[in-house]
Image (tube, rainbow, N blue to C red):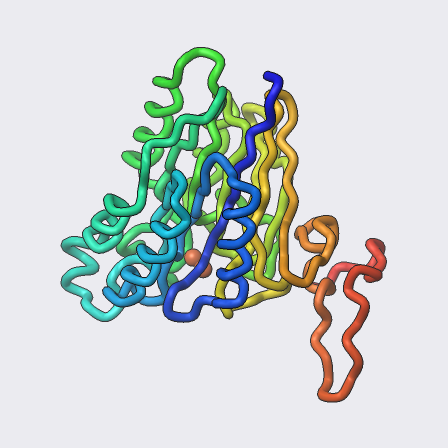
Amino acid sequence: MASETLLFHLSDIHFGLEDNKALDWVKQEIAELRPLAVAITGDLTMRARDREFAAACNWINALDLPVTVEIGNHDMPYFNLLERFFAPYNRFRAIEKLIEREIDLPGLAIVSLKTAVRAQPRLNWSKGWVTRPAQAKCLAAIDALPAGRKALVAVHHPLREVGTKGTALTHGGLKALTELAKRPVLAVLSGHVHDPFDLIEDTPAGPVRMIGAGTLSQRLRSTPPSFNELRWDGHTLTVRARNLDEVPTRYMQIEDVPENALPPREPGEPVAPVNQVPRTDPPVH
Ligand SMILES: [Fe+2]
Ligand SMILES: [Fe+2]
């Protein structure tokens, strides 16, 4: 393949508590670089309110390019429990219809795997859960791809813990990842933990690459607002964690201890030169 495919991977915009400065910047980057598509890996909103979905819809449609969206745990009804149980995905699906457009990428396909569920047999329903039907649907979509086409699997929750401050604790994650390892999967794209990473996870069926995008909301964990720029040349997928503070990707990603990437400051303390944080800093437990 001669030309390079450029994709943007955004996540966790959380309209209702979005970072407008970051969103203006991303919009500008999209207008300038014109990626072939944008994949958004969930948590479009804070509480799945109509006004939050409307804001998401307006912002995404104004990008004027193909976009895929995944459902996040914040995109299901939060206040209306009846709706949460009986029609948890209706609000998101209605918006998805307005937003998503057919995407035709050379040699690649973005395939969805739902990890957000209405309820689960543990106290914290915000965590990930791969149901059997969701996994079957995803695998069938991969198996139906034309020969030679590789899949980028888009999920909300990382399928395995990756050492970020936030956790996904995805039930069935390793099983799903093991099935994906048997198939032509280039990478699994996720969000939820609000910090970026790019790791290889070993499964009983072989390695799978897991790529996480940070957040474009005010709900920061360890790193400034960011998104991932993915470049695919037919052989290699490269990832840059783009951020307004211009922190280099290697300091943004979890393998380089993002807990230390932006150390908390006392009032009056000068801003630390983030890009000079030594890579050998001990991990914070
Ligand atoms: Fe989130
Ligand atoms: Fe989430």
Q: Residue furthest bottom?
A: 268
Among the 4 quarters of the image, the one containing residue 244: bottom right
Instruction: Give the image quadrant in which the ligand numbered 2 is located.
Output: bottom left
Query: Observer-nearest residue: 23 or 73?
Result: 23
Residue 119: x %, y % from top left: 28, 56
Residue 12: x %, y % from top left: 45, 57
Residue 107: x %, y % from top left: 49, 20
User: For the image shown, how many numbered marks are present on the structure?
Assistant: 0
Query: Observer-nearest residue: 97 or 255?
Result: 97
Identify the image quadrant of the N terminus: top right
Among the 4 quarters of the image, the one containing residue 225: bottom right
Residue 257: x %, y % from top left: 72, 57
Identify the image quadrant of the C terminus: bottom right
Q: Which residue sits at x=41%, y=63%? A: 14
Q: Which residue sits at x=29%, y=60%? A: 53
Q: Which residue sits at x=38%, y=57%? A: 59
Is 248 located above or below residue 262 in the figure?
above
Q: Which residue sits at x=24%, y=62%? A: 77
Q: Is residue 131 left or right of residue 179?
A: left
Q: Is residue 203 left or right of residue 94?
A: right
Q: Residue furthest top?
A: 147
Q: Is residue 232 left or right of residue 47?
A: right
Query: Observer-nearest residue: 36 or 283?
Result: 36
Is 149 located above or below residue 260 in the figure?
above
